[in-house]
Image: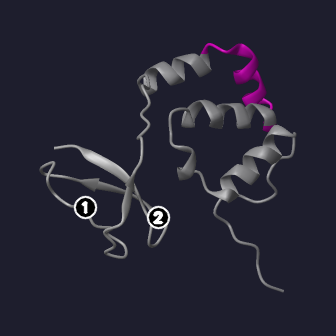
Amino acid sequence: MPIYEYRCNACQRKVAIYLRNFSASPRCPHCGGEDLSRLFSTFALRGTYKDIYDDILTDRQLTDGLMRNDPRALAEWNKRMTRGMEDDMMSPEYEETLGRLEHGEMPQMPVGEMPEDD
């Protein structure tokens, strides 16, 4: 009883659908459309979080950078922690922040804090 991924040709959304049997006709859970195109699903083999932490903690250059609040080290830490996640799960804001960190720019406000209106 697998979960299949489809692209709905009506609303253009990528959807994951659990099918109880192979003869079932899938419908888009968002718009109810029946015109779906099957996608090849990706998967990732990921070590345990312990493996990821060990990788980070044994990298002396990375840990020294994190201790110095180096934005490039923070970007590398983020990349390692999110390795194996689907790219479409990353928000544009996350991608922008990661790009700034990689170029040495530290964020000016804590994550989640919104600037006040003037």
Choose between 13 and 54: the one closer to the eye: 13
Examine the rendering and report whether any part of residue 70 can be seen: no
Residue 64 in the image: x percent, y percent?
76, 22
Residue 17, quarter of picture:
bottom left
Residue 89 in the image: x percent, y percent?
53, 51
Q: Which residue range is magenta in the image?
A: 58-71
- Badge 2: how crowded within 10 Å, few (<14), some, or many (20+)? some
- Residue indicated by mark 2: 13
Give the mark nearer the N terminus: 1 vs 2.
2
Q: Which residue is rendered at x = 41% and y = 41% of the image?
A: 41
Q: Is residue 28 magenta?
A: no
Q: Main secondary structure of the magenta part?
A: helix
Q: Which residue is rendered at x = 84% and y = 86% of the image?
A: 118
Q: Given the image, on which type of amino acid does mark 2 rest?
A: Arg
40 over 93 or under it: above or below:
above
64 over 107 or under it: above or below:
above
Residue 43, quarter of picture:
top left
Residue 4 in the image: x percent, y percent?
31, 48
- Residue indicated by mark 1: 26
Examine the rendering and report whether any part of residue 102 can be seen: yes
User: CB under 8 Å between callouts 1 and 2?
Assistant: no
